[in-house]
Every structure is written in structure tokens, then in C-alpha cells.
């Protein structure tokens, strides 16, 4: 059975920087940079321009990862696209990305299957687990795993929505998971979900139990209440569960691999809140220099946080071949996951 390793990483963030102060000055939100930094660690985020979709953000990240893996798009056997902000209700953004990669063009068209993964902040780790299994089983040699979000178009950028709107940013990260006979790669993945809390962090734009699934006005135009239009979150409850589940997932990973935190060189946690990550790190005894963060610059990019972190760490020289790395995430669902990789 081959091993599955990460052969390439890529990322892309849109150029427009939106500082905490800009939320106040440009959008008129009653907030302060101090409030946001103290509660979350976020200093700025990126917002994509009008007309740019989630698959558009994913494309340069995917190309970057494929090129760094020494491959071309036609070498892919599968695309897994994790997002909670797909371009449309359907089809999945993976199909849009597949066409944008040029896979369907010309004589050497290869109709690579594309699967969207809807596991929010844990979407990348769920996809990495699935990709690893596909590669280890021999079904695929190279799987592209993308996490991409365009949050900015779906944030209530008013004072009413400030608790959620100040957290999120746009961006995309990608990795290629490839087969190898070398003794390296993904050593294990651990996923979990607790659907009892599905409503605690959710965006219920429509309700398919009802006809019409979106209420209509007299002329048949859809009407969506603000509380359904925008993401709703019980932040304190999410915070509590995040800490508990992330610690649990990491401890389980260490136990099942018979390793300790000291065997792990770098920790890549989902970037939802710097305070959550610091608390988890303190509880486990992770030295600050082993915890990689970029939430200060990008905010929470949901499915994209971990692959962006990996790509940046590799480019800066912090993440090197031979290191043992742990990834941990938690989010809406509730869903969570961990993975340990020998880089
Ligand atoms: O990736 C998905 C997973 N998500 C998370 O992990 C998020 C977890 N939760 C959190 O990170 C925190 O709960 C938040 C950062 C979202 C909020 O922090 P909090 O300490 O739980 O604040 P809060 O929601 O209880 O709000 C405290 C106060 C409220 O004012 P009052 O009612 O005490 O007068 C809010 O209206 O802060 C107010 N507030 C703000 N003030 C200035 C909320 N958002 C803002 C804001 N600027 N942006």
C-alpha cells in the first residue's frame, strides 16, 4: 500500500486589504480595532472584488500547488473542493474549478471527477482524510485538495452583523496529495461531528422543508429575513466547544500514533480566533514558536486557513522536509478534525 504525502502547496488571497479601522470608516460598523484584536487577534483581512467567485480564488492556489508538486492539471485523478461559500447553490465549485483548470479542453481532455466537501472550518481536514484514503487505496495517484472561501459577499457588513462580520476574510489554499513508496506522508487523520449543535453556527438562507423554500412576495420574488440571510453564531458556545474538541482531537492523534506533543515540530490550527488557539496551546504545553498563525493578516478564511498556513510556512522556510506536523480544526456542524503528517 503506498503512502500519501503532500507533494505541493499553494495559496491565493485577493489583493484588497481591509483593516479593522476600515470596517468602521468604510462600512460604518460600530466597532474598534482594539475590540477585534483583543477578542480575536485579527488586524486585517482580504476582500475579493465584485465579480470574483470562489472558484476564481481557488484557481491560482490550485495552479500553484500543482506546479510545486511538479505536475500538470492533467495528472490529477480527483478534485476535492472544501467550501461553505460555493459560487452557487449547485453545482459545486469543484466543477467550476475543474473547467477553469483547462481539463476539459482539447484533444487531451481529462474529465477529472470533482467533489465538493461541505464541512465548513473542518472542510480541509475532512478532505485531506478522504484524499489520503483515495491515494492509499490505490484508486488515485494525485488528488487536488482545495479550501476556498469568498465570505465578503455574504457578511452582514453593518453594526447588526458586527460579531460575525469582523471575523471572516476571503482566500484560497490548496495541496496535492500524492502516492509515494517513501516512508513519509499522512500518518493518520481523526474526524468528528456533533450534529446536535448544527444550528449554533449556521446560515439558513433557505428552508427546503417549506414550499416555497424561500418565501415569495406577490410578484414571485424571493424574500429572505436578515436572520436567515446572514450567518448566525452563538460565539461563546462555539468557543467552548472548539477548545474542548481541538484538545481532544490532538490528544487522540498523539495517543494513536504513540507520540507526544514534543515529537511534533509545528502545529497548524484552524484560524478562527487567536485566543482559542493560544488557549489550546497552553493547555497542551505547546511552545509559542511551534504554533503557526496568520489570522492577524487574513482573519478566518474557514476551509482555506490550514492550506494557506502550510503554503506560507513552506515558502518562508519554516516548514521543511522531514518535519512532523499536526493540523487541528473545529467549526460549524459542529465538526472537527486532526491530522499528523511527516512532511
Ligand atoms: O471558524 C468558526 C468557528 N468560530 C469560532 O471559533 C468563533 C468562536 N467565538 C469567538 O471567537 C467569540 O465568541 C467572538 C470573538 C465571536 C465574540 O467574542 P465574545 O467575547 O464572545 O463577545 P460577545 O459576542 O459576547 O459580545 C460582547 C460584546 C457585546 O456587547 P454587549 O451586549 O456586552 O453590550 C457585543 O455586542 O461585544 C459586542 N460586540 C462588538 N463590539 C465591537 C460584538 N462584536 C463586536 C465588534 N465590535 N465587532
Image (cartoon, rainbow, N blue to C red):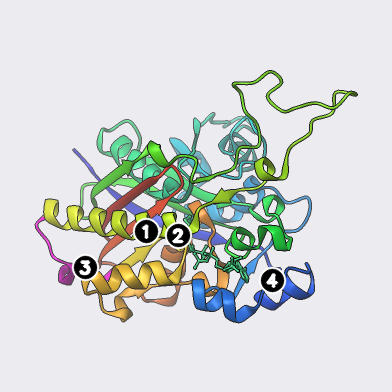
Q: Which residue is mark 2?
A: 236
Please give the residue where the numbered disc 1 appears in the rendered image: 240
Mark 4–mark 3 distance (CA, rounded to whole Å)? 34 Å
Mark 2 vs 1: CB contact within 8 A: yes
In the rendered image, which residue does mark 3 sit on?
A: 264
| Crowdedness near tag 2: few (<14), some (14–19) or many (≥20) residues, C-alpha within 10 Å | few
Residue 260: say if magenta: yes
* Rendered residue at 76%/58% (across/down): 49
Q: Is 224 displayed left or right of 187 in the figure?
A: right
The residue nearer to you, when weighing 167 against 11, is: 167
Q: Relative to 13, is 287 above or below?
A: below
Disc 2 Cβ-to-ligand 1 distance below 8 Å: yes
Q: Would you call the spot at circle 4 few (<14 residues within 10 Å), some (14-19), or many (20 or more)?
A: some
**Which one is in front in this view, the residue at disc 4 or the one at disc 3?**
4
Nearer-N-terminus badge (2/3): 2
| Of the two numbered discs 4 and 2 in the rendering, the one whose residue sits closer to the viewer | 2
| Left or right of 119 on screen, residue 288 | left
Outermost residue, right side: 219
Q: State how far apart marks 2 and 1 are (Cα).
A: 6 Å
Q: Is 170 part of what is drawn in magenta?
A: no
Start and end of the magenta stretch?
Answer: 258-266
Label 3: element kind: loop
The residue at 58%/49% (across/down) is: 232
The one of 160 and 136 positioned closer to us in this rendering: 160
Q: Nearer the viewer, mark 4 or mark 1?
A: 1
Residue indicated by mark 4: 18
Image quadrant where one finds the N terminus:
top left
Amino acid at each position: 500500500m503506498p503512502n500519501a504525502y503532500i507533494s505541493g502547496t499553494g495559496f491565493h488571497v485577493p489583493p484588497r486589504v481591509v483593516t479593522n479601522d476600515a470596517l468602521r470608516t468604510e462600512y460604518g460598523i460600530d466597532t474598534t480595532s482594539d475590540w477585534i484584536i483583543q477578542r480575536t487577534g485579527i488586524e486585517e483581512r482580504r476582500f475579493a472584488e465584485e465579480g470574483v467567485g470562489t472558484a476564481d480564488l481557488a484557481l491560482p492556489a490550485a495552479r500553484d500547488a500543482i506546479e510545486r508538486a511538479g505536475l500538470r492539471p492533467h495528472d490529477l485523478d480527483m478534485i476535492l473542493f472544501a467550501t461553505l461559500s460555493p459560487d452557487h447553490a449547485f453545482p459545486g465549485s469543484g466543477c467550476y474549478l475543474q473547467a477553469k483548470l483547462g481539463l476539459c479542453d482539447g484533444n487531451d481532455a481529462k474529465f477529472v471527477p470533482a467533489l465538493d466537501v461541505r464541512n465548513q472550518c473542518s472542510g480541509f481536514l475532512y478532505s485531506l482524510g478522504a484524499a489520503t484514503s483515495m491515494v492509499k487505496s490505490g484508486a488515485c495517484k494525485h488528488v487536488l485538495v482545495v479550501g476556498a472561501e469568498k465570505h465578503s459577499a455574504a457578511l452582514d457588513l453593518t453594526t447588526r452583523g458586527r460579531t460575525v462580520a469582523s471575523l471572516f476574510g476571503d482566500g484560497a489554499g490548496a495541496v496535492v496529495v500524492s502516492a509515494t513508496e517513501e516512508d513519509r506522508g499522512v500518518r493518520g487523520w481523526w474526524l468528528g461531528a456533533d450534529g446536535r449543535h448544527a444550528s449554533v453556527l449556521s446560515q439558513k438562507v433557505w428552508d427546503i422543508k417549506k414550499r416555497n423554500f424561500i418565501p415569495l412576495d406577490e410578484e414571485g420574488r424571493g424574500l429572505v429575513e436578515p436572520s436567515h440571510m446572514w450567518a448566525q453564531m452563538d460565539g461563546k458556545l462555539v468557543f467552548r466547544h472548539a477548545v474542548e474538541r481541538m484538545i481532544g482531537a490532538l490528544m487522540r492523534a498523539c495517543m494513536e500514533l504513540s507520540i507526544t506533543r514534543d515529537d511534533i515540530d509545528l502545529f497548524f490550527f484552524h484560524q478562527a480566533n487567536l485566543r482559542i488557539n493560544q488557549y489550546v496551546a497552553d493547555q497542551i504545553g505547546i511552545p509559542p514558536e511551534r504554533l503557526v498563525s496568520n489570522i492577524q493578516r487574513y482573519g478566518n478564511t474557514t476551509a482555506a486557513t490550514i492550506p494557506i498556513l502550510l503554503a506560507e510556512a513552506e515558502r518562508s522556510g519554516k516548514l521543511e522536509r522531514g518535519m512532523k506536523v499536526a493540523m487541528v480544526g473545529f467549526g460549524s456542524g459542529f465538526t472537527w478534525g486532526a491530522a499528523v503528517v511527516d512532511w
